């Protein structure tokens, strides 16, 4: 085969050495002080050191090495931080920024040195050198003190070392090469697995075109149109045509992952060769009651890196689908950490189904795919994307608690005078903020505190390099994560942030970096891939969502009309009730309960009732119970409770599995676990009552949002309250009509829905809604079922 025709398998120098050369225990007792170069300040330190060097120093030199084999070429590429060319030496400089005291650093970290050795071999060979020097430059991030280690190598010695490294990697590259051929061949003749529903073909072609052109697409499509397959199928076909290499299917809730798993499974049944992995939360994959990646506490952490590559390779060659059970079985067999093994497996699969966090959250995102300077040919399919508004804000916000500073100071007292002193200094600055704060206060900047927090983090790193009693070590380690995240987010603060102080539910004093608009941070993550498809049943109004997710001005948008007969939905808006606080009394509750009663009385079946809060749920439920006792009317009732376990949720939903002898009413909280992502088709659900407009509770965060958008002349009330509230309403109402055979009733129980501001947010499939009073509701519902 001609070299030009051979497939190229790329890997970065860093990924190569970190993957092949890792060994020993998995251990989180130290805070991985050497990995701090990933922080934004790391790049600044690199540039500062590079500028201080002589003219003989060339910074940021890109290097590539092609290793040709019979069927493919492995391309190893990276960027040397510096190359020094002097009369008496040629050296590769590798710079690492760390927070620890450099006195504790006695030799370079092996994988850091290995990176530099790769660059040394590549550069030395390509320039005809016989020997070359490796220089490791460690810089303390706070003091900017520098410590260097140098070592001389012959190119002959590096050639053998690099050859062994590539020999170890060859079987993985071979797997990747064979995998791509098998995957591509399996896609020939692969067809959409269902007859196309109305509007679905447009979605499929829209998704495919978006991916092939490397753009972003927003899909507003009603529930039940088949959005998941309409996104997965064209994405898979695009991969087969070479437009992308890995699909990330992102969800907000565990329950919606199942739909994605089923979509991939159906295509696999039709002949598609596609390896898919579902990433489960660490807590659910851990063999211990509470995760503790410490070789003294966990046998799976001890020697983990000595065995994990073998465990992953076997897993990859034996099956195509990886769920929690398969991962736990394999981890048990090889005595490795199942969660870390899961993440390693992710590198080699074709599709990953996971929570938003693993792509976007700076605390837990998958560094191998989304770390600093890492990019890939990824396709992002973002399910129920409306959830990304609040999730995105939380991911890029950070909070510092004054009481936690004090508690940590008490813990370290007697163990470190210096750390105790810095913690108290930070606490005093927080106390000054507290004296100025009544309910909440917006601050212009926190420059003085941020400098003290940098000192604090640095001293924590030093503290953690020494041995202390376990309880103290853990407290400092945990709090160091909080401080580091806070500082990382402080580096991101710009016009999209508001910094404010306020009080928590327990009276604790808090300082929050509030990411009001996460679009810049989200877009930076998405730019690491090729293309993104956002889809949701409730993307209204679309400009609102685009303004929070995307910084691009070339996005596509598709509004898919409902394929289901409009006459199958009886949508009624009540003009004589409201859930406003000023109207919440027994008389109003009786009217709301009467609407619910008339809905259920209209036809025997299963119903859901969505309330604004747990308190109102209990109040309405009590009044409803009185009403059914008056008529001796039988209804089985289920109530959602706060903090339901997964088993509780499943039990709740199982009650809706089939039609019972008597009607069933589930009372739920709007915006909760039962108002989206659940699929109760046919007779499993025939009606829903939505009480209230879903407005979020008034609080400091919502008021800050409102003020922020008012200042930008963007209708602050809508952005902070109306749009998020209406989204919950649309989601709740969307539970009823899921297929073209479904018929059902939806009651919107709040007269505010008749205001123009709300009616403008009604989706197209709500046209022809009826306005009614409680006196009219029963007969209209009865007639709908009779005529059906």
Image (cartoon, rainbow, N blue to C red):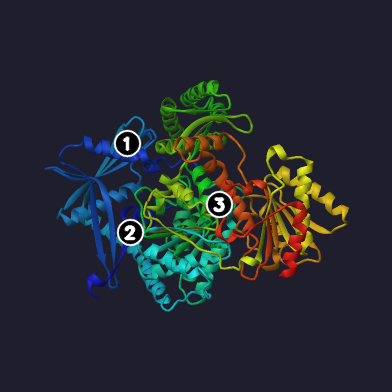
Disc number for residue 761: 3
Instruction: Check disc 3 and report its element: helix, strand or loop.
Output: loop
The residue at the point 56 percent across, 61 percent down is 222
Q: Quadrant of residue 261?
A: bottom right
At 56% from the left and 46% from the top, the residue drawn is: 757
Marks 3 and 2, how far apart at CA: 48 Å
Inspect this view and state whether residue 638 appears.
yes
Q: Nearer the viewer, residue 406 or 534?
A: 534
| Label 1: how many Cα within 10 Å (few below 14, some 14–19, many 20+) | many
Quarter location, residue 741:
bottom right
**Quarter of the image where one finds residue 149:** top left
Callout 3 crowding tier (Cα within 10 Å): few <14, some 14–19, many ≥20: some
- As measured in the structure, the alpha-carbon distance from the residue carrying label 1 to the one carrying label 3 is 55 Å
- Relative depth, front residue between 88 and 36: 36
> Which residue does the numbered mark 2 point to in the structure image?
11
- Residue 268, compared with residue 646, is above or below; it is below
Q: Nearer the viewer, mark 2 or mark 1?
A: 2
Q: Secondary structure at mark 1?
A: strand
| 660 relative position to 500: left or right | right
- Residue 251: where, in percent of width, then height? 53, 56
In the rendering, at what x and y percent does residue 782 appear? 76, 63
Can I make out residue 314 in this image? no
Q: Nearer the viewer, mark 3 or mark 2?
A: 3
Q: Total of numbered circles in the picture?
A: 3
Look at the picture and state if 611 lies above or below 491: below
- Quadrant holding the C terminus: bottom right
Query: Which numbered circle lies on residue 139?
Result: 1
Vertical placement of 55 versus 743: above or below? Answer: above
């Amino acid at each position: 085969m001609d070299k030009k025709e051979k497939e190229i398998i790329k890997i970065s120098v860093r990924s190569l050495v970190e993957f092949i050369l890792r060994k020993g225990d998995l251990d989180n007792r130290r805070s991985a002080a050497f990995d701090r170069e990933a922080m934004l300040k790391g790049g600044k330190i690199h540039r500062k050191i590079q500028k201080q060097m002589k003219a003989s120093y060339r910074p940021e030199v890109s290097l590539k090495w092609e290793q040709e084999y019979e069927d493919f070429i492995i391309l190893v590429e990276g960027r040397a931080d510096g190359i020094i060319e002097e009369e008496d030496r040629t050296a590769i400089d590798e710079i690492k920024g760390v927070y620890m005291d450099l006195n504790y650093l006695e030799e370079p970290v092996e994988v850091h040195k290995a990176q530099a050795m790769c660059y040394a071999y590549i550069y030395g060979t390509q320039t005809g050198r016989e020997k070359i020097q490796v220089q490791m430059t460690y810089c303390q991030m706070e003091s900017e003190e520098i410590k260097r280690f140098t070592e001389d190598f012959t190119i002959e010695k590096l050639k053998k070392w690099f050859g062994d490294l590539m020999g170890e990697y060859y079987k993985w590259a071979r797997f990747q090469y064979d995998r791509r051929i098998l995957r591509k061949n399996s896609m020939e003749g692969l067809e959409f697995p269902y007859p196309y529903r109305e509007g679905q073909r447009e979605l499929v072609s829209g998704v495919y075109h978006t991916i092939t052109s490397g753009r972003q697409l927003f899909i507003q499509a009603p529930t039940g149109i088949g959005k998941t397959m309409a996104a997965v199928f064209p994405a898979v076909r695009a991969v087969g045509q070479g437009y992308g290499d890995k699909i990330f299917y992102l969800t907000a809730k565990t329950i919606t992952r199942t739909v994605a798993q089923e979509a991939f499974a159906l295509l696999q049944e039709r002949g598609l060769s596609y390896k898919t992995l579902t990433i489960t939360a660490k807590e659910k994959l851990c063999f211990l009651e509470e995760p503790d990646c410490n070789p003294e506490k966990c046998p799976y952490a001890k020697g983990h890196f000595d065995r994990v590559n073998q465990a992953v390779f076997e897993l990859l060659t034996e099956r195509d689908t990886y769920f929690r059970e398969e991962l736990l079985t394999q981890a048990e067999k090889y005595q490795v950490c199942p969660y870390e093994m899961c993440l390693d497996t992710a590198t080699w699969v074709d599709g990953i189904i996971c929570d938003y966090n693993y792509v976007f959250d700076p605390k837990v995102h998958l560094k191998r795919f989304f770390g600093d300077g890492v990019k890939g040919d990824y396709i992002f399919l973002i399910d129920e994307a409306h959830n990304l508004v609040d999730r995105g804000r939380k991911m890029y916000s950070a909070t510092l608690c004054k009481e936690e500073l004090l508690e940590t100071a008490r813990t370290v007292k007697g163990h470190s005078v210096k750390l105790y002193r810095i913690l108290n200094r930070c606490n005093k600055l927080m106390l000054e903020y507290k004296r100025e704060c009544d309910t909440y206060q917006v601050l212009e900047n926190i420059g003085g505190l941020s400098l003290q927090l940098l000192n604090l983090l640095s001293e924590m790193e030093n503290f953690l390099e020494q041995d202390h009693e376990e309880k103290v070590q853990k407290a400092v380690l945990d709090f160091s994560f909080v401080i580091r995240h806070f500082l990382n987010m402080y580096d991101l603060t710009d016009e999209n942030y508001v910094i404010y102080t306020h009080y928590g539910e327990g009276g604790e004093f808090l300082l929050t970096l509030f990411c009001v608009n996460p679009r810049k941070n989200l877009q930076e993550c998405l730019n690491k891939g090729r293309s993104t498809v956002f889809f949701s049943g409730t993307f209204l109004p679309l400009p609102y969502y685009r303004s929070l997710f995307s910084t691009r001005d070339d996005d596509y948008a598709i509004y898919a009309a409902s394929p289901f007969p409009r006459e199958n939905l009886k949508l009624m808006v009540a003009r004589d009730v409201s859930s406003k606080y000023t109207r919440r009394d027994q008389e109003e509750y009786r009217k709301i309960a009467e609407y619910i009663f008339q809905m259920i009385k209209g036809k025997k079946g299963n119903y859901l009732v969505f309330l604004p809060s747990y308190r109102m749920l209990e109040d309405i439920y009590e009044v409803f119970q009185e009403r059914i006792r008056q008529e001796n009317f039988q209804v089985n009732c289920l109530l959602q409770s706060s903090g339901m376990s997964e088993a509780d949720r499943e039990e709740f939903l199982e009650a809706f599995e089939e039609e019972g002898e008597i009607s069933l009413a589930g009372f739920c909280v709007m915006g909760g676990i039962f108002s989206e992502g659940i699929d109760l088709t046919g007779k499993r659900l025939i009606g829903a009552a939505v009480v209230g407009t879903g407005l979020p509770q008034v609080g400091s965060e919502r008021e800050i949002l409102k003020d922020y958008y008012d200042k930008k002349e963007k209708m602050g009330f809508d952005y902070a309250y109306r749009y998020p509230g209406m989204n919950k309403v649309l989601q709740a109402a969307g539970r009823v009509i899921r297929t073209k055979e479904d018929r059902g009733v939806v009651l919107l129980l709040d007269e505010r829905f008749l205001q123009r501001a709300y009616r403008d947010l009604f989706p197209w499939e709500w046209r022809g809604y009826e306005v009614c009073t409680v006196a009219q509701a029963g007969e209209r519902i009865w007639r709908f079922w009779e005529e059906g």
